[in-house]
Amino acid sequence: MVSGASSNIFVGKLKDILEYSIEEPLNYLVNWGRLYALWPVHLETACCSVEWGAVSGPRYDIERWGMLAAFGSLRQCDVLVILGTVNRKMAPRVRMIYDQMPEPKYVIAMGACAVSGGLYFDSYSVLQGVDKIIPVDIYLSGCPPRPEQLIEALIMLQNKIRISKIS
Amino acid sequence: MVETSNTESTLIEREQKLAADLKSRFGDVLEITIKSKRIKIKVKSERLLDIANYINNELGFDHSTSVSGVDYPNSKEFEVVYHLSTYGREDFRDIVIAFSTRISRDEPKTLSLINIWPSVEYSERETFEMFGIIFEGHPKLEKLLLPEDWNDIPPLRKDFKPPGR
Amino acid sequence: MSKLSLSVGPQHPGSGHMRIILTLSGDYIIEAIPDPGYVHRGEEKLAEYRNYIQNIPHLERPVVLDATGAIFPYVLAVEDLMNIIVPERAQFIRVIMAELNRIISHLYYMAIYGIFMGHSTMFMWPVGDREVFIDLANTIAGQRVTYAFLVPGGVRNDMPEKVKEQADKACNYFEKRLIEYEHIFMNNPLFEKRTKGVGILPKQDAIRLGVVGPTLRASGIKSDVRKDDTYSIYNQLDFEIPVSNACDSWSRAWIHMEEMRQSMSIIKQCLKRIPTGPVKLNLKQIKVPPGESYSRVEAARGSLSYYLISDGGKVPYRVRIMTPSFRNLITIPYIMKGVMLADMPPTYWGIDYWPVEADR
């Protein structure tokens, strides 16, 4: 009754049913939980950190979009926001901070200096873009970017998380 | 700003008196230039400590605002400039003295003035790492701002070209 | 009691990158050694490869909160070498922008002071009130944070008409808010317990170490570059210098609050007396003759000075920047002795140290 060909079809259909009924809703549920509760580590380097302060304030309020500036320990944070220039003395420490965060983790590079060196393209001491040492998810350019652009970067990151697979 | 020669001479009266005082004490070791509220004194390195002590104790210039190094590769010299100001003497508070000395570029060494003006501690360290000038008598002459593993020539010299230029 | 060496490392939120190596005995600090350099970008070298106008947006970036205070001495030095006189209306607009930047910088200081004490209301209120003044700066200069507004010969553009009304509204609103800040923060018993008598810098040490800014005035020395070595039109204006003899962290915060009041009074006086006229000289090109110039200005954190050497070419020969944070760095081993570890962040922030400015 159960021959070789029909058992293959049976296993294939079972996989489809399981995927449709369990894996997709589970993906949706876990990603929903992650994207509205992002805790950032902010590397308050330079000029862009002033706009970070403004965006956590009462007028631009990034907390209503899901990012709470919790000032907690690194071991319970998801997002690393690089706010400005990273130079050669600081680069090993940035790598250490990135390694200390648990998975899943995301990186936003904010400002022209973090994206590609920016205004300091010929400096002897500035790293030309932070993606030389850590993988970056969202690039946000500007010098400094306005607070509304930072909120747009957060929404793009949330869209990216929403369609990702958790396996 | 120069209006008439009458007001110009009263504008720089105090500076002229200070310059005359120093010239009468130390003679030809000094070379002085005067502008309104700014005096520049160039000193030969043998009498550096004596003149610095006199400016601190007798004239009352009690702290240094900055230490700068300047590179003159054409005449093979470095110039070390100390800018001095005062809080104690209220009638001299707007005057700034630029106290400078020239040293050779191949063997850059000079005496540290940290025992006279303690405020030069971090500025002398920065001039050391940016130009390679050694200040004898400084308690901790190490890197301050550059990365710990810097192994190129000191970056503010004129023969150091920035990467990409 | 055995000693413990603790490295308060380069990454800490709220302040910027700067490491302090502490030696503790129990709960008390016995030695503190600063370790700057984590934001060093090489500004002095880069300034020798850009011409006099290209340097302006570039030299604003270290002192980003007080951008006008960073560029003011640079344009004064260039104008001194070129021997030109700036029109009156431009001088009044420069002073208005400088005092506005002083208020904006001091509000950020109060906000971060609140966060370091754990008082999150004191973070939200100043950051929100700061937006009122940033909007005013936006109306005058066209940008939120870094303006590139001052040029040798004047300012870039004229102010629009509605600035006077907007400034009156902002100052009236903020004067009432300052009284509320005093109620919740300055007279708060916890804040007083943690900062009164902590972080003492005696008067003799302050003179010997050459400190500047509110740290100097909190140690009993009445000195301010706007009165001592006056520049622009400050000798025509009427304002006071707050001074305190207590030499501790509480009085440094108090001086910041009083200076904001004086700045609002200066802005109102300038808007009443500003004349009409051109706002910049029509210079065909910036040609700087050879020479040296030293100029200084009272920026928000203290006295900022430039030593500019020109050899007659298109680019400067040497630009030496001396910022107030670098001059106040020397006080850290002195004020931290005997302080409890939990009180270290407010003591450190009290001297208004901004790491980007100190490292340039």
Image (spheres, coloured by chain):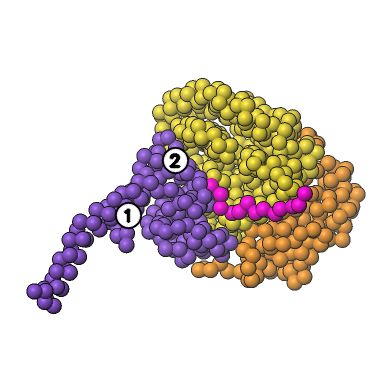
Tag 2 subunit = A
CA gap between label 1 and label 2 equals: 22 Å
The spot of residue C356 in percent (x, y) is: 58, 50
Q: Quadrant of the N terminus of chain B?
A: top right
Which residue in the rendered view is the most extreme toward the bottom? A4
Which residue in the rendered view is the most extreme toward the left? A1
Residue at x 83%, y 50% (from the top left corner): B116
| Residue C110, placed above or below residue A51 | above
Q: Label 2: how many residues lie within 10 Å, few (<14), some (14-19) or many (20+)? A: many
Amino acid type of the residue tagged 1 in the rendering: Ile
Q: Give the structural element (helix, strand or loop) at label 1.
A: helix
The spot of residue B126 in percent (x, y) is: 69, 58
- The picture quadrant where one finds residue C218 is top right
The spot of residue C177 in percent (x, y) is: 51, 24
Label the orange chain with its letter: B
The colour of chain A is: purple
Residue at x 40%, y 58% (from the top left corner): A104
Residue at x 80%, y 49% (from the top left corner): B117
Label the yellow chain with its letter: C
Is A56 left, or right, of B162 in this rendering? left
Residue A56's tag is 2
Residue at x 78%, y 41% (from the top left corner): C205
Q: Magenta includes A102? A: no
Q: Give the structural element (helix, strand or loop) at label 2.
A: loop
- The picture quadrant where one finds residue C44 is bottom right
Residue A161's tag is 1
Q: Which residues are magenta?
A: C1-13
Nearest to the observer: residue C291 or residue A141 = A141
Tag 1 subunit = A
